[in-house]
Amino acid sequence: MVQLSFEVYDNFPACEPTLQRLAQRLQHPNPFLQPEWLNLWWEYFGAGKSLYIMVCRHNGEAIGYAPFYRIYRSALGLHEYYLLGDGYSSYLDLACPQGYEDTFLSALFLHFQNLSSGAIVQFRDINNRFSYFYQALENAWKQKLNNGMCFNLYSCPLVTFAGNWDEFYKNRHGSKARKNLRRKIERLTQTLGSFCFRRVTDPGELDYLLPHLERMHGERFTKTVNIVLKGQKLLLLRSALSKMLNDNLYLFVSELDNCPISFLIGFKMGATFIAFIMAFDPAFSLLALGHVQLIRIMEAINQEGYTVFDFSKGDAEYKRYWSNAETTSHMFRFGFQLSRPGQMYYRLLNGTLEALVYLRHQGYNRTIKHWLARLRQGDLLRKEASAVKIEELKDQVGVTRPEDYPEWSYRIIRGLSPEVRSAIIKCVIKTETSQLRVDHRPQQRTVT
């Protein structure tokens, strides 16, 4: 039997060269397991936590790693261990040569059993398709090792391309649906202004683009709670884009008159493209801008040789509209050497998560997020406007009809509220294209 041991590091500089060599040798495709991402995540989320990176060795040679951090619960006399990247990564995993997963996990469990204090070890966002250690963890849970628990956290819809994009598109949607989307694309690209879809490859553009992306994401999720572009998460993403763009990280934008109106940030994982964060200007919702953007992006990545477009965690309706398969993300939790108070705490953690998972699967989490958002915005006692009255436009921008714009441009209205922008855009697309005087002259943009 292969004998494995672990060497524990409590700081990145000491172990980073080893992690880099292992990542290069193992060629694990998961971008959230790469040292660059782990280091960035720790830089922004490491406060109040202790690093616990375990390098696995066989006969003294490093063969894999398990990147954890831990939090000490002094009242219970135990440590809680979490994978680095927990909470802000699509899929997590451990790294070792393929075929060693069961042996690696057995040695890992033995390490925790031999610690002087109790331990609760949690493996969140382990995907049943993309995480190499899923099967080993599932086997350990089914064998009831170390009080193991398993929770089905999310459905993760995805698109698999059997052939080229055109074949997939025709097989996925009927002629009527394709015609409807084609009409919306024509209105968006030919009626409203100079439309451009592109992949951003120059990090120098980020200072200009990111404030627009943050604004759009906030406007899209005003009726729910979504903090993926808030606080430390936004700072982490800014740093990741500046350091990893064109490597494991992609940024796509759609622009109207050189102004961003939609974006998608995604990660490369072998032949799979992971859509990490996506948003669009909600003023264009009647033109199905989100679907238009997805069409362009899926066509582009299919032409680059990707065979899977993964929508990441969550089961939103628009994901189901496109997906033809799905995976599931799980959380595995194990307890080692727990005292009686530690066992009670362990059961409390499991019961709480079980209730949250039930609420999510029943759809209650969306309702809760909606009401939390309304409370946060102070909208609880105010009725939502079903539509913006056209007369209101006159007070805000001095026009009631698109003809009042001598040179219509999205630039003129982008500073207004999403509701007002939406009403103006509706006016424009209801007017015959021949009657509109659209300014197609290229705009100069200064990148700072």
Image (cartoon, helix red, strand yellow):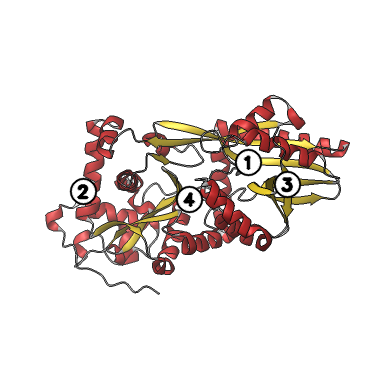
Label 3: which residue?
Answer: 6
Residue 430 vertical placement versus 128 (above, below): below
Q: Which mark is residue 186?
A: 2
Ranked by sequence position, the earlier of labels 4 and 2 is 2
Answer whether residue 381 is visible to the viewer in this image: no
Element marked by disc 2: helix
Disc 4: CA contacts within 10 A as few (<14), some (14-19) or many (>=20):
some
Ranked by sequence position, the earlier of labels 4 and 3 is 3
Q: Which mark is residue 286?
A: none
Q: Please name which of the two marks, 4 or 2, marks the residue nearer to the observer.
A: 2
Label 1: which residue?
Answer: 124
Distance CA(mark 4)–CA(mark 3): 44 Å
Task: Kindly check if marks 1 and 2 are in contact, taking CB atoms under 8 A apart as contact.
Answer: no
Label 4: which residue?
Answer: 221
Q: Amino acid at mark 3?
A: Phe
Residue 357 % position (x, y) = 62, 34
Answer whether residue 159 is visible to the viewer in this image: yes
Q: Amino acid at mark 4?
A: Phe
Distance CA(mark 4)–CA(mark 2): 26 Å
Distance CA(mark 3)–CA(mark 2): 59 Å
Q: Amino acid at mark 2?
A: Glu
The answer to which quarter of the image holds residue 140 is top right
Distance CA(mark 3)–CA(mark 1): 21 Å
Task: Kindly check if marks 4 and 3 are in contact, taking CB atoms under 8 A apart as contact.
Answer: no
Task: Kindly check if marks 4 and 2 are in contact, taking CB atoms under 8 A apart as contact.
Answer: no
